[in-house]
Image: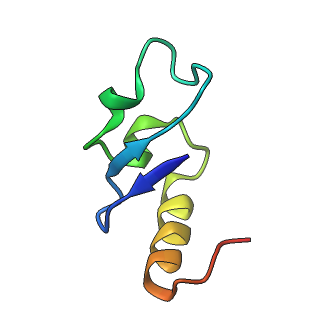
């Protein structure tokens, strides 16, 4: 789980299995989600996340 701020920077990351190699959740804090993950459509993901933040409606 990730908690993001309005600029889509990671504020908090919680995971129980390694998902980014050697990086700990603490090392992700302050970084943009789209910079951390190798997303197939970073612009689309960012657009979806901004819509959720603006509307408060969960993504489906």
> In this view, which residue lies farthest toward the left?
30
Q: Position of residue 22 (x, y in %)?
A: 45, 11
Vertical position of residue 11 compared to residue 59: above or below: above
Residue shown at 25% from the left, 43% from the top: 30
Q: How many marks?
A: 0
**Does residue 12 appear to the left or right of 14 in the view shown?**
left
> In this view, which residue lies farthest toward the bottom?
55
Residue shown at 43% from the left, 47% from the top: 34
Viewer-closest of 60 and 40: 60
**Quadrant in the rendering for residue 17:** top right
Q: Position of residue 6 (x, y in %)?
A: 31, 68
Residue shown at 40% from the left, 22% from the top: 24
Q: Position of residue 12 (x, y in %)?
A: 38, 45
**Quadrant in the rendering for residue 40:** top right
Q: Position of residue 43 (x, y in %)?
A: 49, 60
Residue shown at 32% from the left, 52% from the top: 9
**Does residue 4 appear to the left or right of 21 in the view shown?**
left
Vertical position of residue 36 compared to residue 50: above or below: above
> In this view, which residue lies farthest toward the right?
60
> In this view, which residue lies farthest toward the top?
22
Looking at the rendering, in which quadrant would you find the C terminus?
bottom right
**Quadrant in the rendering for residue 26:** top left
Vertical position of residue 16 compared to residue 21: above or below: below
| Colouring mode (rainbow / by chain / secondary structure / one colour) | rainbow
């Amino acid at each position: 789980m990730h908690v993001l701020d309005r600029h889509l920077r990671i504020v908090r990351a919680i995971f129980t299995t390694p998902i980014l190699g050697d990086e700990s959740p603490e090392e992700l804090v302050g970084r943009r989600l789209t910079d951390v993950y190798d997303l197939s459509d970073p612009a689309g993901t960012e657009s979806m996340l901004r819509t959720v933040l603006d509307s408060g409606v969960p993504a489906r």
